[in-house]
Image: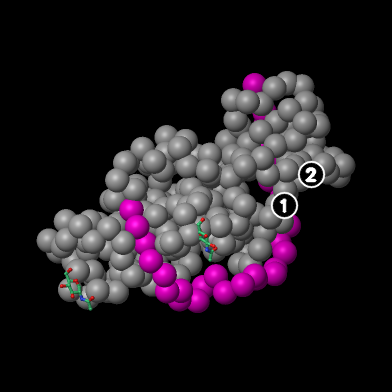
Amino acid sequence: MAIFLCFLFLIISSATGCDRCVHRSKAAYFSKASALSTGACGYGPMAIGFNSGHLAAGVSSLYKDGAGCGACFQIRCKNTTLCSSRGTRVMVTDLNRNNQTDFVLSSRAFMAMANKDMGQGILKQGILDVEYKRVPCEYKNQNLAVRVEESSKKPNYLAIKLLYQGGQTEVVAMDVAKVGSSNWGFMSRNHGAVWDTDRVPAGALQFRFVITAGIRWKVDLGSECPA
Ligand SMILES: *[C@@H]1O[C@H](CO)[C@@H](O)[C@H](O)[C@H]1NC(C)=O
Ligand SMILES: *[C@@H]1O[C@H](CO)[C@@H](O)[C@H](O)[C@H]1NC(C)=O
């Protein structure tokens, strides 16, 4: 389906909680690499390509009903024999339904916390004491992108997925309108990073977002807009 996408921005500053403080918890890892490509955020197999495969399932306070999808955290384990002080950066792609650890990491991310030659050592531990804090994600040459989902159906149903949402912001609301129109209709979070509406206007579309945190968030996809 041919959908033209344009963007407008609505910045709302309302930082919540203490996202950027250092938190202490535990982290475990997924022994199956496939676990995170079926994650609750709905990224599917494309998740494997995100953040060099350093992925994580976060507990509900981090997953935030899907608003936490795509958020990045610097995480390190506290045993200095086993682990480097720098740790690694992980991206949330799934909900951790088990409340014993704040994170379950991909094994690649888990091992990336290790000192040289300690990778097997930390796998053997299974669960580690960790510290973590929210950090911006790093996407090389990627801005926020909107991917139209295959479940979209003309003429009225549109489902999209938000990708490469960098920074430390979260999308908490989203509207859609026909380009040039100020008749905005809201979209709902279907699950994870997927938003939908069954009242999509015909023709080229523009979106606006409500985001948390006081960071200006500029996205330029102007070349995809019809002239
Ligand atoms: C760190 O891990 C090593 C190897 O498992 C263990 O021998 C040591 O006691 C741990 N240190 C602390 C402070 O837990
Ligand atoms: C964690 O999960 C267990 C088992 O589902 C439950 O009994 C316990 O109350 C939960 N703890 C917290 C702090 O939510």
- Residue 29 location in percent, x, y? 33, 53
Whether residues under marks 2 and 1 lie with C-beta atoms below 8 angstroms apart, the answer is yes
| 178 displayed left or right of 195 | right
Residue 58: percent from the left, percent from the top?
A: 48, 56
As for residue 4 lying within the magenta part, the answer is yes
Looking at the rendering, the stretch of residues picked out in magenta corresponds to 1-29
Q: How is the image coloured?
A: one colour
Residue highlighted by disc 2: 186
- At horizontal 54% and vertical 51% (from top left) the residue drawn is 69
Q: CA distance from mark 2 to mark 1?
A: 8 Å
Circle 1 is placed at which residue position?
A: 173
Q: As drawn, is 196 to the left or to the right of 128?
A: right
Q: Amino acid at mark 2?
A: Phe
At 65% from the left and 54% from the top, the residue drawn is: 171
- SS assignment at label 1: strand
| As drawn, 78 above or below 166 | below
The answer to whether one can see residue 223 in this image is no
Task: Return the mark for residue 36.
Answer: none
Is ligand 2 less than 8 Å from the beta carbon at label 2? no
Residue extending furthest right? 183
**Looking at this view, is 42 or 204 the one in front?**
42
Q: Choose between 43 and 206: the one closer to the eye.
A: 43
Residue 125 figure quarter: bottom left
